[in-house]
Image (cartoon, helix red, strand yellow):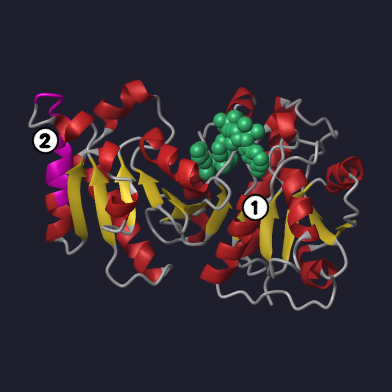
Amino acid sequence: MLPLAVTMGEPAGIGPDIALMAWRDRAEHRLPPFYVIGDPELMEARAARLGIGVPVVQVLPEETVETFAFALPVVAVEGAAADRPGEPSPETAGLVIEAIRAGVEHIRSHRARAIITNPIAKSVLAAAGFSHPGHTEFLGELSRPFRVGPVRPVMLIWSEALAVVPVTIHIPLAEVAERLTRNLIVETGAVVAHDLRTRFGIAAPRLAICGLNPHAGENGLLGREDEEIVAPAVAELNRIGIAATGPHPADTLFHPEARKGYDVALGMYHDQVLVPVKTLAFDEGVNVTLGLPFLRTSPDHGTAFSLAGTGHARPSSLIHSILLAGRLTGAQAFQTTMP
Ligand SMILES: NC(=O)C1=CN([C@@H]2O[C@H](COP(=O)(O)OP(=O)(O)OC[C@H]3O[C@@H](n4cnc5c(N)ncnc54)[C@H](O)[C@@H]3O)[C@@H](O)[C@H]2O)C=CC1
Ligand SMILES: NCC(=O)COP(=O)(O)O
């Protein structure tokens, strides 16, 4: 049985805490076997700080499944981090990045079935010279060794209540209008429709496309992008056989009645769609990167520095990320007689 690879994430954040808690709660949630990639000493120190009785064992990737029964398996990568919750440092950037790289390599070499990433602090990595604004973009680059041709990584935040995709992702709001194009919307919509069919088993996915402007532009009175960019993109998506509607005014797309009309809402910028999904499903939301030759999931939240090492972080979104990665890759729940 191939395990799931979970990266440790930002060492000063809650990633180590929630990974330990997820292992502690593995039987209750029937989690498939997983292991952490990161610094075993940091994981051990955080477990001791939290006092939650989670044994940590450093292992090789081949030894993770058998270890999962009695301890949290941790595969080491180059680099180390002191246990300083809430005090991030660019000095640990190499370790954080290496863990992501190793997780993808473990999938490529058939040692892991999918990668689940714990949160990184984007500005801390940027201060160390990391050129990607987030995992989503970095994972696109890490897809190259899979030799699958061009990759367009797309961010999906998935929950039972609502699934959303931001068409532009990690860019300043001031740049959204100039970087929004008909092709970007069409290519994103095509990746979404393809992966909802192939990964999520939704035979004919229904896409609702938000307008960019208030009232979707109000016939040009409140901005021209909806008529000139979004509406032609919706027409093109329909022409290529994808059930897309819009541009919809975003302010009325997320109430319960409206949500029955689509499988996923595409927003034109990050907060347009992440605000509603995190409001409705903060503890259940899972970030899934579509368009990759492998599966990546992640909690929908960030590093929550003020909670790191306190025991107050909730592992719920990580647990949903592990369960969804397992479900989408056909993993079996771990069979255990342990409490
Ligand atoms: N996938 C990733 O790597 C992500 C990374 N981030 C990074 O996280 C850092 C902090 O971002 P923020 O905007 O402050 O968002 P955040 O999600 O870390 O925190 C927002 C609020 O939610 C609370 N919170 C978050 N996760 C929680 C949990 N598991 N249990 C209980 N409460 C929780 C925090 O205490 C805070 O009040 C930034 O550097 C950002 O780049 C943010 C989102 C995703
Ligand atoms: N707000 C979600 C987010 O920024 C996650 O980014 P990524 O690291 O998954 O690309």
The residue drawn where x is 9% and y is 24% is 221
In the picture, the disc for residue 48 is none
Give coordinates of residue 250: x percent, y percent.
Answer: 27, 39
Q: Is residue 67 above or below residue 237?
A: below
Query: Image check: 293 left or right of 30?
Result: left
Residue 190: % across, % down: 28, 57
| Residue where numbered disc 1 is placed | 316
Q: Which residues are magenta?
A: 221-234
Left-right relation of 290 to 190 = right
For the residue labelled by badge 2, is the local secondary structure a helix, a strand or a loop? helix
Which quarter of the picture shows residue 181? top left
Say which residue appears at 88% left-offset and 67% top-offset: 70
**Residue type, numbered disc 1:** Ser
**Secondary element at tag 1:** helix
State yes or no: Cβ of the residue under disc 1 lies below 8 Å from any atom of ligand 1: yes
Give the mark toward the camera: 2 or 1: 1
Spot occupied by residue 335 in the image (x, y as percentages of width and height): 75, 78
Label located before the other in sequence (2 or 1): 2
The residue closer to the viewer here, 273 or 240, is: 273
